Image: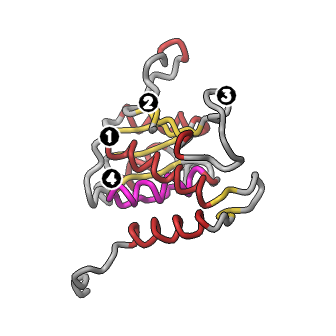
Amino acid sequence: MSARSPGAASVSARLREAIARHAAAGRTALVGRFEPVSYQALGERIDGFADAALKWGVRRGEVVGIATARNVDTVALFLGLMQAGACPCVMEPRLAPDVALLRMRAVGMKRLVVDRDHAALGSEVAAAGMTVGLAEMKPVAARRRLRSPALTREASSRCQVSWPYPAQDDSERSGWMNDCE
């Protein structure tokens, strides 16, 4: 594999440029069994997850697992981790914890991000000594007025991420959520 030529942009930098270009044109990024997502909204979600990953201490080249539902937020999380310099690895969230741990150890993965639907896997992996984060998207409309249907910089990055993984009991969850804004 040859070294990157001087001045060549990284995949993440090219992606950010493309997202900004499409956002400026008001284009839709994703359409599916969910509300259409604009490039602006997707870019802001990506930025939010990238910021959270850096605050979590993710290092360049570090392999970080993702065991979440397959949805828009998983796309943003994957690209946000990549933007932060990590090597994101989507894992099957329904894996048995021992199988997940075996795969994590095989590639030197020490961090895993889960969503609430896969909290049990997160708990098991954390109990085995791995670092686990809970990623979850929260609507901003209840906290802040949006100026347009798409998210704006003012209401950026609807993501909240807890690092490290919180206790299972909701009574112990106060104070563990950090805004990515």
Looking at the rendered structure, the secondary structure element under dot 1 is helix
Q: Is residue 109 left or right of residue 139?
A: left
Residue 109 shows which numbered tag?
Answer: 4
Q: Is residue 33 left or right of residue 107?
A: right
Residue 8 rendering spot, x and y as whole percentages: 30, 80
Find out whether residue 85 is within the magenta segment. yes
The earlier-in-sequence mark between 4 and 3 is: 4
Q: Callout 2: few (<14), some (14-19), or many (20+) C-alpha neighbours within 10 Å?
A: few
Q: Quadrant of the N terminus?
A: bottom left
Near-viewer residue (81 or 153): 153
Q: Amino acid at mark 3?
A: Ala
Residue 20 rendering spot, x and y as whole percentages: 52, 64
Q: Callout 3: few (<14), some (14-19), or many (20+) C-alpha neighbours within 10 Å?
A: few
Label 3–label 1 contact, CB within 8 A: no
For the magenta stretch, what is the residue range? Answer: 73-91
The CA span between labels 3 and 2 is: 17 Å
Looking at the rendered structure, the secondary structure element under dot 4 is loop
What residue is shown with label 3? Answer: 142
The CA span between labels 4 and 3 is: 36 Å
Which of labels 4 and 2 is toward the front?
Answer: 2
The CA span between labels 4 and 2 is: 23 Å
What residue is shown with label 1? Answer: 55
What residue is shown with label 2? Answer: 178
Residue 33 in sight in this render: yes
Which of labels 3 and 2 is toward the front?
Answer: 3
Q: Amino acid at mark 2?
A: Asn
Looking at the rendered structure, the secondary structure element under dot 2 is strand
Near-viewer residue (6 or 171): 6
Q: Residue at x 42, y 72 (%)?
A: 14
